[in-house]
Image (cartoon, rainbow, N blue to C red):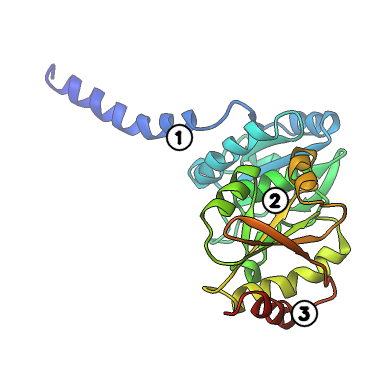
Amino acid sequence: MARAGPAWLLLAIWVVLPSWLSSAKVSSLIERISDPKDLKKLLRTRNNVLVLYSKSEAAAENHLRLLSTVAQVVKGQGTICWVDCGDAESRKLCKKMKVDLSPKDKKVELFHYQDGAFHTEYNRAVTFKSIVAFLKDPKGPPLWEEDPGAKDVVHLDSEKDFRRLLKKEEKPLLIMFYAPWCSMCKRMMPHFQKAATQLRGHAVLAGMNVYSSEFENIKEEYSVRGFPTICYFEKGRFLFQYDNYGSTAEDIVEWLKKVWPL
Protein backbone atom coordinates (compact mmCIF):
# COMPACT_ATOMS: atom_id res chain seq x y z
CA MET A 1 0.00 0.00 0.00
CA ALA A 2 2.85 2.37 0.80
CA ARG A 3 4.14 2.01 -2.75
CA ALA A 4 0.75 3.00 -4.20
CA GLY A 5 0.75 6.37 -2.41
CA PRO A 6 3.17 8.22 -4.74
CA ALA A 7 1.44 6.76 -7.79
CA TRP A 8 -1.93 8.07 -6.65
CA LEU A 9 -0.32 11.40 -5.84
CA LEU A 10 1.15 11.65 -9.34
CA LEU A 11 -2.21 10.72 -10.85
CA ALA A 12 -3.94 13.42 -8.82
CA ILE A 13 -1.39 16.00 -9.95
CA TRP A 14 -1.77 14.88 -13.59
CA VAL A 15 -5.56 15.30 -13.38
CA VAL A 16 -5.49 18.66 -11.61
CA LEU A 17 -2.58 20.23 -13.50
CA PRO A 18 -4.35 20.96 -16.84
CA SER A 19 -7.14 22.75 -14.98
CA TRP A 20 -4.62 24.73 -12.95
CA LEU A 21 -2.69 25.70 -16.08
CA SER A 22 -5.92 26.81 -17.75
CA SER A 23 -6.81 28.99 -14.79
CA ALA A 24 -3.32 30.47 -14.71
CA LYS A 25 -3.82 31.84 -18.22
CA VAL A 26 -6.93 33.79 -17.25
CA SER A 27 -6.24 37.42 -16.44
CA SER A 28 -7.29 38.67 -13.03
CA LEU A 29 -8.99 41.49 -14.95
CA ILE A 30 -11.67 39.02 -16.11
CA GLU A 31 -14.36 38.83 -13.46
CA ARG A 32 -15.97 35.42 -12.96
CA ILE A 33 -19.60 35.77 -11.93
CA SER A 34 -22.18 33.20 -10.82
CA ASP A 35 -24.64 35.20 -8.73
CA PRO A 36 -27.36 37.17 -10.60
CA LYS A 37 -27.12 39.92 -7.99
CA ASP A 38 -23.42 40.37 -8.67
CA LEU A 39 -23.99 40.70 -12.41
CA LYS A 40 -26.85 43.11 -11.88
CA LYS A 41 -24.66 45.27 -9.66
CA LEU A 42 -21.80 45.17 -12.14
CA LEU A 43 -24.02 46.21 -15.06
CA ARG A 44 -25.35 49.05 -12.94
CA THR A 45 -21.89 50.36 -12.09
CA ARG A 46 -20.02 49.71 -15.37
CA ASN A 47 -21.21 51.10 -18.69
CA ASN A 48 -19.25 48.93 -21.15
CA VAL A 49 -19.34 45.22 -20.33
CA LEU A 50 -18.62 42.15 -22.47
CA VAL A 51 -19.78 38.87 -20.92
CA LEU A 52 -18.57 35.45 -22.03
CA TYR A 53 -21.15 32.76 -21.32
CA SER A 54 -19.80 29.22 -21.76
CA LYS A 55 -21.30 25.74 -21.77
CA SER A 56 -18.45 24.56 -19.54
CA GLU A 57 -15.08 25.67 -18.24
CA ALA A 58 -13.33 23.66 -20.95
CA ALA A 59 -15.47 25.28 -23.66
CA ALA A 60 -14.35 28.72 -22.49
CA GLU A 61 -10.62 28.02 -22.48
CA ASN A 62 -9.68 29.45 -25.91
CA HIS A 63 -11.90 32.51 -25.51
CA LEU A 64 -10.56 33.17 -22.01
CA ARG A 65 -7.00 33.06 -23.28
CA LEU A 66 -7.84 35.62 -25.98
CA LEU A 67 -9.96 37.80 -23.70
CA SER A 68 -7.19 37.87 -21.10
CA THR A 69 -4.96 39.72 -23.56
CA VAL A 70 -7.84 41.99 -24.60
CA ALA A 71 -8.57 42.86 -20.96
CA GLN A 72 -5.05 44.23 -20.50
CA VAL A 73 -5.52 46.67 -23.39
CA VAL A 74 -9.06 47.88 -22.58
CA LYS A 75 -8.46 48.24 -18.85
CA GLY A 76 -10.28 51.37 -17.69
CA GLN A 77 -12.39 51.49 -20.86
CA GLY A 78 -14.29 48.20 -20.78
CA THR A 79 -15.00 45.28 -18.47
CA ILE A 80 -14.89 41.59 -19.37
CA CYS A 81 -16.75 38.94 -17.36
CA TRP A 82 -17.16 35.19 -17.54
CA VAL A 83 -20.14 33.05 -16.58
CA ASP A 84 -19.77 29.25 -16.69
CA CYS A 85 -23.29 28.06 -17.47
CA GLY A 86 -22.22 24.47 -16.82
CA ASP A 87 -21.69 25.30 -13.19
CA ALA A 88 -24.70 24.46 -10.99
CA GLU A 89 -24.51 27.83 -9.26
CA SER A 90 -24.48 29.78 -12.54
CA ARG A 91 -27.31 28.02 -14.42
CA LYS A 92 -29.94 30.24 -12.83
CA LEU A 93 -28.02 33.32 -13.97
CA CYS A 94 -27.69 32.05 -17.55
CA LYS A 95 -31.40 31.28 -17.70
CA LYS A 96 -32.25 34.72 -16.32
CA MET A 97 -30.05 36.40 -18.95
CA LYS A 98 -31.73 34.34 -21.72
CA VAL A 99 -28.54 32.54 -22.70
CA ASP A 100 -29.26 29.37 -24.68
CA LEU A 101 -26.29 27.06 -25.09
CA SER A 102 -28.36 23.93 -25.65
CA PRO A 103 -27.48 23.43 -29.36
CA LYS A 104 -24.62 20.94 -29.69
CA ASP A 105 -22.53 23.26 -31.86
CA LYS A 106 -22.90 26.27 -29.56
CA LYS A 107 -20.29 26.32 -26.81
CA VAL A 108 -20.07 30.03 -25.98
CA GLU A 109 -21.96 33.30 -26.35
CA LEU A 110 -20.56 36.82 -26.13
CA PHE A 111 -23.11 39.43 -25.05
CA HIS A 112 -22.41 43.13 -24.71
CA TYR A 113 -24.13 45.39 -22.20
CA GLN A 114 -24.01 49.17 -22.30
CA ASP A 115 -25.27 51.66 -19.73
CA GLY A 116 -26.87 48.89 -17.68
CA ALA A 117 -28.82 47.24 -20.51
CA PHE A 118 -28.26 44.56 -23.14
CA HIS A 119 -26.75 46.15 -26.24
CA THR A 120 -25.93 43.39 -28.73
CA GLU A 121 -24.63 39.90 -29.27
CA TYR A 122 -21.01 40.11 -30.36
CA ASN A 123 -20.95 38.61 -33.85
CA ARG A 124 -17.82 40.17 -35.30
CA ALA A 125 -14.50 38.39 -35.81
CA VAL A 126 -13.27 36.70 -32.64
CA THR A 127 -9.77 38.17 -32.87
CA PHE A 128 -7.70 40.36 -30.59
CA LYS A 129 -7.87 43.42 -32.85
CA SER A 130 -11.60 43.16 -33.54
CA ILE A 131 -12.64 42.72 -29.91
CA VAL A 132 -10.38 45.55 -28.75
CA ALA A 133 -11.79 47.84 -31.44
CA PHE A 134 -15.33 46.86 -30.46
CA LEU A 135 -14.82 47.54 -26.75
CA LYS A 136 -13.19 50.88 -27.49
CA ASP A 137 -16.15 51.85 -29.69
CA PRO A 138 -19.10 49.42 -29.26
CA LYS A 139 -21.30 51.29 -31.73
CA GLY A 140 -18.58 51.90 -34.29
CA PRO A 141 -18.22 50.07 -37.62
CA PRO A 142 -16.28 46.80 -37.94
CA LEU A 143 -12.63 46.97 -38.88
CA TRP A 144 -12.06 47.18 -42.62
CA GLU A 145 -9.98 44.00 -42.52
CA GLU A 146 -13.00 42.06 -41.21
CA ASP A 147 -14.52 42.35 -44.69
CA PRO A 148 -13.59 39.13 -46.58
CA GLY A 149 -13.37 41.18 -49.78
CA ALA A 150 -10.52 43.24 -48.30
CA LYS A 151 -8.08 40.33 -47.94
CA ASP A 152 -5.76 41.74 -50.63
CA VAL A 153 -5.51 45.16 -48.97
CA VAL A 154 -2.52 45.51 -46.63
CA HIS A 155 -3.95 46.78 -43.33
CA LEU A 156 -1.54 48.96 -41.36
CA ASP A 157 -2.06 49.33 -37.61
CA SER A 158 0.88 51.43 -36.48
CA GLU A 159 3.45 53.93 -37.65
CA LYS A 160 6.02 51.14 -37.32
CA ASP A 161 4.02 49.00 -39.78
CA PHE A 162 3.78 51.96 -42.14
CA ARG A 163 7.51 52.76 -42.08
CA ARG A 164 8.40 49.08 -42.52
CA LEU A 165 6.17 48.79 -45.59
CA LEU A 166 7.69 51.91 -47.16
CA LYS A 167 11.18 50.56 -46.57
CA LYS A 168 10.70 47.05 -47.95
CA GLU A 169 8.13 47.42 -50.75
CA GLU A 170 9.56 47.43 -54.27
CA LYS A 171 6.25 47.50 -56.12
CA PRO A 172 4.20 50.69 -56.60
CA LEU A 173 2.28 51.46 -53.43
CA LEU A 174 -1.04 53.25 -52.99
CA ILE A 175 -2.10 53.95 -49.39
CA MET A 176 -5.53 55.13 -48.31
CA PHE A 177 -5.40 57.13 -45.07
CA TYR A 178 -8.94 57.03 -43.68
CA ALA A 179 -11.20 57.50 -40.67
CA PRO A 180 -13.74 54.78 -39.75
CA TRP A 181 -16.67 57.23 -39.63
CA CYS A 182 -15.91 58.83 -43.02
CA SER A 183 -18.80 58.28 -45.47
CA MET A 184 -16.66 58.92 -48.55
CA CYS A 185 -14.12 56.39 -47.27
CA LYS A 186 -16.87 53.79 -46.86
CA ARG A 187 -18.09 54.44 -50.40
CA MET A 188 -14.62 54.08 -51.83
CA MET A 189 -13.42 51.05 -49.83
CA PRO A 190 -15.19 48.37 -51.94
CA HIS A 191 -13.65 49.80 -55.12
CA PHE A 192 -10.22 50.13 -53.50
CA GLN A 193 -10.23 46.53 -52.27
CA LYS A 194 -11.44 45.24 -55.64
CA ALA A 195 -8.57 47.09 -57.31
CA ALA A 196 -6.18 45.52 -54.77
CA THR A 197 -7.30 42.07 -55.90
CA GLN A 198 -7.00 42.94 -59.59
CA LEU A 199 -3.50 44.36 -59.07
CA ARG A 200 -2.23 41.60 -56.78
CA GLY A 201 1.37 40.78 -57.64
CA HIS A 202 1.83 44.01 -59.60
CA ALA A 203 1.08 46.77 -57.07
CA VAL A 204 0.26 47.04 -53.38
CA LEU A 205 -2.82 48.82 -52.05
CA ALA A 206 -2.86 49.51 -48.32
CA GLY A 207 -5.24 51.08 -45.83
CA MET A 208 -4.52 52.87 -42.57
CA ASN A 209 -6.93 54.37 -40.06
CA VAL A 210 -5.11 57.54 -38.99
CA TYR A 211 -7.98 59.26 -37.21
CA SER A 212 -6.35 58.83 -33.80
CA SER A 213 -4.11 61.62 -32.50
CA GLU A 214 -1.19 59.16 -32.29
CA PHE A 215 -0.82 59.54 -36.08
CA GLU A 216 -0.39 63.34 -36.15
CA ASN A 217 3.17 62.97 -37.47
CA ILE A 218 2.02 60.96 -40.49
CA LYS A 219 -0.87 63.34 -41.19
CA GLU A 220 1.46 66.31 -41.07
CA GLU A 221 4.15 64.65 -43.19
CA TYR A 222 1.75 63.68 -45.99
CA SER A 223 -0.67 66.62 -45.78
CA VAL A 224 -3.65 64.55 -44.63
CA ARG A 225 -6.19 67.35 -44.20
CA GLY A 226 -9.32 65.28 -44.76
CA PHE A 227 -10.50 61.73 -45.35
CA PRO A 228 -9.77 59.82 -47.38
CA THR A 229 -6.33 60.97 -48.45
CA ILE A 230 -4.68 58.57 -50.90
CA CYS A 231 -0.92 58.75 -51.42
CA TYR A 232 1.20 57.12 -54.10
CA PHE A 233 4.73 55.86 -53.33
CA GLU A 234 7.51 54.31 -55.36
CA LYS A 235 10.30 52.48 -53.51
CA GLY A 236 9.50 54.28 -50.29
CA ARG A 237 9.34 57.74 -51.84
CA PHE A 238 6.11 59.75 -51.77
CA LEU A 239 5.34 61.15 -55.23
CA PHE A 240 1.79 62.54 -55.21
CA GLN A 241 -1.79 62.17 -54.04
CA TYR A 242 -4.55 60.37 -55.90
CA ASP A 243 -7.56 62.64 -55.68
CA ASN A 244 -10.28 60.96 -57.76
CA TYR A 245 -12.48 60.07 -54.78
CA GLY A 246 -15.41 59.08 -56.96
CA SER A 247 -13.40 56.45 -58.80
CA THR A 248 -14.28 52.81 -59.39
CA ALA A 249 -11.90 49.85 -59.13
CA GLU A 250 -11.35 50.07 -62.87
CA ASP A 251 -10.43 53.77 -62.59
CA ILE A 252 -7.82 52.99 -59.94
CA VAL A 253 -6.33 50.15 -61.99
CA GLU A 254 -6.17 52.26 -65.16
CA TRP A 255 -4.59 55.17 -63.29
CA LEU A 256 -1.89 52.93 -61.83
CA LYS A 257 -1.17 51.49 -65.27
CA LYS A 258 -0.47 55.02 -66.50
CA VAL A 259 1.90 56.03 -63.70
CA TRP A 260 3.60 52.62 -63.53
CA PRO A 261 3.22 50.41 -66.63
CA LEU A 262 2.27 46.99 -65.28
Q: Looking at the image, is mark 1 or mark 2 nearer the viewer?
A: 1
Residues packed near mark 3 inside 10 Å, few (<14), some (14 to 19) or many (20 plus): some
The label on residue 99 is: 2
The residue under label 3 is 248
The residue type indicated by label 1 comes to Ser
Q: Quadrant of residue 12?
A: top left
Q: Earlier in the sequence, mark 2 or mark 3?
A: 2
Q: Which percent across, then down, holds residue 245? A: 84, 70
Q: Is residue 112 left or right of residue 246?
A: left
The residue type indicated by label 2 comes to Val
Q: Looking at the image, is mark 3 or mark 1 nearer the viewer?
A: 3
Q: Earlier in the sequence, mark 1 or mark 2?
A: 1
Dot 2 falls on a residue whose secondary structure is loop
Mark 3 in CB contact with mark 1 (< 8 angstroms): no
Residue positioned 52% across, 62% down in the render: 170
The label on residue 22 is: 1
Residues packed near mark 2 inside 10 Å, few (<14), some (14 to 19) or many (20 plus): some
Mark 2 in CB contact with mark 3 (< 8 angstroms): no
C-alpha distance separating marks 1 and 2: 24 Å
Q: Nearer the viewer, residue 200 or 6?
A: 200
Residue positioned 80% across, 39% down in the render: 213
Q: Which percent across, then down, holds residue 184? A: 86, 66
Quadrant of the snapshot with the N terminus: top left
Residue positioned 81% across, 31% down in the render: 46
C-alpha distance separating marks 3 and 1: 50 Å
Q: Nearer the viewer, residue 223 or 90?
A: 223
The residue type indicated by label 3 comes to Thr
Q: Nearer the viewer, residue 216 or 102?
A: 216
Dot 3 falls on a residue whose secondary structure is loop
Q: Which percent across, then down, holds residue 107? A: 56, 53
Q: Earlier in the sequence, mark 3 or mark 1?
A: 1
Q: Is residue 210 above or below residue 254?
A: above
